[in-house]
Image (cartoon, helix red, strand yellow):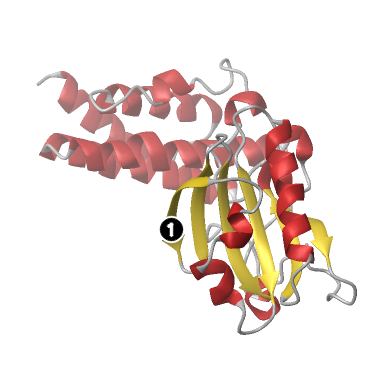
Amino acid sequence: MRSVMRRLDEIAVVLKERGDTIALLGLGSCGAQPARLDDHSDLDFYVIVEDGAAWRYLDRTDWLEAPGPVTYLFTHQRGGRRALYADGVFVEYRVLTVADLARTPFAGARVVWRRPGAPAGLATSGAPVPRPPFDTEEYHLNDALVSLYIGLHRELRGEHLAASRLIQHRAVDAVIALLRLGGGEPPYRDAFEPARRIERAHPVEVLPLAAMVPGYTGNVAAVRFTLGWLERRYTVPAGIGDALRELVRSVDVR
């Protein structure tokens, strides 16, 4: 845990000696919420550079390897890399200009280092964090129900993996969104990935994930359980509710 934060500080020391760097931002557990940090945390950061300098920090890794040898590196997105240090510190970083940063949605950033005269507000995104089309109980409830319905039809067609992604992923994400709306923002919620730390936010009595996500061969059981969970807590529209129950019954008699 300490080695991750130390590595970020070591990278800052390297970058501050260069004339084409503007700032280093920590994100995730190395950002504005350090209480999330544990022995399994990786290191997420943005390197903010002058216009025209990004290629030096993407194509060259001398700055990255200055704190220690890198044993693994690959490009995972435009302007972004993932890497593994020999001592086990895993990093994910992007190299951005100030203009790039203004177009990038992010949350929970922390300025680790900034050069004198750097623009203010670097730790605040100028782009909105992606949201569902409608962040309402009605939307998430119906999104869950439709995901169960379409997913069960795909299961019956023999598309078990495609079915599981609707039944045990999308529908469960909708359930998580319903709980968020009903009980407020859970601590350290990840704006980009609702499943992160969800076990800490809701006890198993409230969110029985083992029953909602039983695995590749458990799609029918997951539909049956998640539908029942929704019916006990919300008013399920009759049309989709009746259709789902009838579909589940048809599976039971097969």
Give the residue at x 67% y 36%. 182
For label 1, the crowd category at 10 Å Cα-Cα, with few meaning under 14, some 14 to 19 and many 20 or more, is few
Quick one: quadrant of the N terminus? top right
* Camera-side residue of 229 and 11: 11
The answer to whether 87 is drawn above or below residue 76 in the figure is: above
158 on left or right of 182: left
Tell me the residue that label 1 is attached to: 76
Evaluate whether residue 124 shows in this view.
no
Quick one: quadrant of the C terminus? top left
Give the residue at x 59% y 25%. 199
The answer to whether 196 is drawn above or below residue 216 in the figure is: below
State which quadrant residue 156 falls in. Answer: top left
* Camera-side residue of 104 and 117: 117
Give the residue at x 65% y 25%. 200
Evaluate whether residue 132 shows in this view.
yes
The answer to whether 137 is drawn above or below residue 77 in the figure is: above
Could you tell me residue 244's position as x and y percent?
Answer: 29, 35
121 on left or right of 164: right
The answer to whether 153 is drawn above or below residue 73 in the figure is: above
Disc 1 marks a residue whose amino acid type is His
Q: Secondary structure at mark 1?
A: strand
Residue furthest to the bottom: 52
